[in-house]
Amino acid sequence: SHFEHFHMSVAMRELLLCFVVAGRADWLATTVDNRSSAEELATKIRARLADTKQELENVHLEDIRSFYWWDGQVQEEPEVRATIDSQVPFEALLEILQAEHPYEVPMIISRVDDEEQISRDEGKYLAATAYLNDTASEEAAELAKELVKVRYVACAQVGPVEGAERDQLLTLKTTAASKEQIQVDFGGLKFNWMPIRGNKPYLDWVTENVKIRSHASEL
């Protein structure tokens, strides 16, 4: 099957460690227009942190295609996802990113690991990844577009898996309330789910752009 979980390369497993498990360092993920913008943003963050004698441990950049709901239709944009790993607490990184980010409403997210936070409002938002084995980029893009079109997710992103020419990684952001309908209607995919926190304007946008369907006839 195109959507069976496949054996990842060692490099990709190491990269996705930031998304799947909690580590000693805090981390966040954001997106920008291109690699130049990502590098400029990282430079600004490092400059701000230097004043407090703190630093970024790593900034990993990935070229992706992003699909999201805007102006009543699905939009598509090429973007670069930057995953920032640092000892700096998430809230401090978030404050810097919001001040320096070129987008008016950027995506700035991280994993929620604290059970108390998950049980409160921060448990309302989820990110998920699914590996698309032996799948062309256009086929993966159509799947991402469909998830946004039916409003099950606010945004979906696809990009190639490092070292695997025919494999794609699908990433989505949605609400916890939408998880069940995604699993029912896209049950052929094996999703890895995680609760996320982020900047309030982005999370509010996610809430506004995800719809919970009571019946398939609503689609």
Image (cartoon, grey):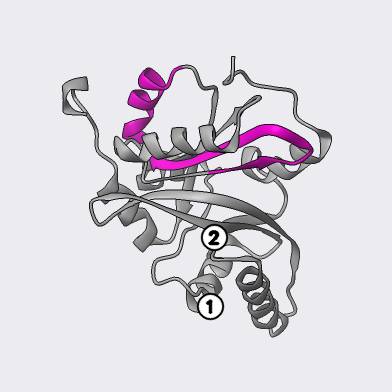
Q: As rendered, which of 182 and 56 lies closer to the eye?
A: 182
Total numbered labels placed on residues in the image:
2
Q: Residue 168's quadrant in the figure?
A: top right
Question: Which residue lies under the disc numbered 1?
Answer: 100
Q: Please, is residue 91 above or below residue 139 in the view?
A: below
- Left or right: where 182 falls relative to 94: left
* Amino acid at pointer 1: Glu
Question: Which residue lies under the disc numbered 2?
Answer: 31
Residue 143 seen in render: yes
Give the residue drawn at x 73%, y 35%.
165
Give residue 144's position: percent from left, percent from top: 45, 38
Local secondary structure at mark 2? strand
Q: As rendered, which of 3 and 135 lies closer to the eye?
A: 135
Give residue 141's position: percent from left, percent from top: 49, 39
Residue 194 seen in render: no
Q: Please, is residue 58 above or below residue 17 in the view?
A: below
Specify the segment rendered in magenta. 158-187
Q: Please, is residue 161 above or below residue 134 in the view?
A: below
